[in-house]
Amino acid sequence: MSVKLIIKTGCTLPRLAAEQGDFEDWIRRELSDAAGWRVVNVTAGEELPPPADCAGAVITGSPAMVSERAPWSEATAAWLRAAHAAKVPLLGICYGHQLLADALGGEVGYHPHGPEVGSVEVERLAEAAADPLLGELPVRFSAHVIHWQTVLRLPPGAERLAGNAFEPHQAFRPGSAWGVQFHPEFDQPAMRRYLELLHDRLSAAGRDPQALLAGVRPTPEAAGLLARFAALLPAPAA
C-alpha cells in the first residue's frame, strides 16, 4: 500500500478556519489528486504509518514553534528522519520546512529581525535550475509568508534553492525532501485575513499591517509547487 500523507502539525487561526478552512483544505485545493491524500493530525496523537507504506508526504504549517520541542513534534521529527532515510518524497511547508531541517541536523530558532509576513519576492537560485520541483519557477516569483522562526542553519549536505534578502532559506533540498519557508497553499484571501486578525501582534513587532495588506498579490508560481510535488510521487502499484 502506498499512502500519500498530509501531516497536520497545527491549525490556522480559529476565525480564519471557520471562514476559509484549514491548512489541509488549502493544500488539497492545490493538489492535482486531492482525494487521494490522507490527513494525519499528529498534534492530536494520530499515528503515522510506517515510511515503507508511504508514497510521499506534505508537512503543514503550524502556530507552534519547533524550538518548543513538543512531544508530538519530536516524534514527527523522528518519523521524518526515518522517511528521509527511506527516500520517501517529502515537502515541508513553513513549520514543516523548519521541522525537516531540525530533524536532519540543521538549526531552527527565532529570526533575528522578527517576523516575515505578507506577499514577498523570492529568488530561485541558480542551484535550483535543474531541480525537479523548483526548477520550473521563474528566477523571481511572489509567495505568501508568515513566520517568526526560521532555519538558521541548513542540515549537512542540504542544498539551498531559494531565498531573499530577509530570509536566505526560503527553500532547500536534502535528497528526496524539500522544505519551503513560504506557503504555497495560501491564496490572497487567506493572507489578507492573517494580516487583519494579527494586526495588533504585527504592529507590536514593528510591522505595518495596512502596508502589508496593500501589498498582498497573487502567487500562482508558488501555488503550483503542490501539484508539481504530487506529480513527482511514484504511481500506485497495479
Image (cartoon, grey):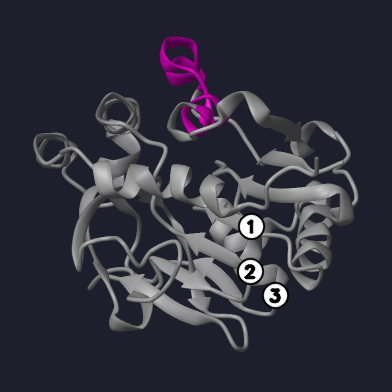
Do the numbered discs 3 and 1 sit on residues whose CB atoms are within 8 Å? no
Report the residue marked by disc 2: 176
Q: Residues within 10 Å of mark 3 (few under 14, many from 20)?
A: many
Circle nearer the N terminus (3, 2): 3
Q: Residue at x 52, y 62 (%)?
A: 179
Residue at the disc numbered 3: 104
Can residue 168 be spotted in the picture?
no
Which-is-in-front pick, marks 3 and 1? 1
Would you say 12 lies left or right of 40 here? left
Q: Is residue 151 magenta?
A: no
**Badge 3 element:** loop
For the C terminus, the quadrant is top right
In which quadrant will I find the N terminus? top right
Q: Is residue 224 above or below residue 13?
A: below
Marks 2 and 1, the one that precedes in the sequence? 1
Residue 23 magenta-highlighted? yes
Q: Secondary structure at mark 2?
A: loop
Q: Amino acid at mark 1?
A: Leu
Name the residue beneath numbered marker 1: 90
In the image, taking residue 86 as reference, residue 20 lies left or right, namely left
How far apart, in angstroms, are the residues tagged by discs 3 and 1?
12 Å
Earlier in the chain: of badge 3 and badge 1, it is 1
The magenta span reads: 14-28
Query: Visible in this render: residue 167?
Result: yes
The amino acid marked with disc number 3 is Leu
Mark 1 secondary-structure assignment = strand
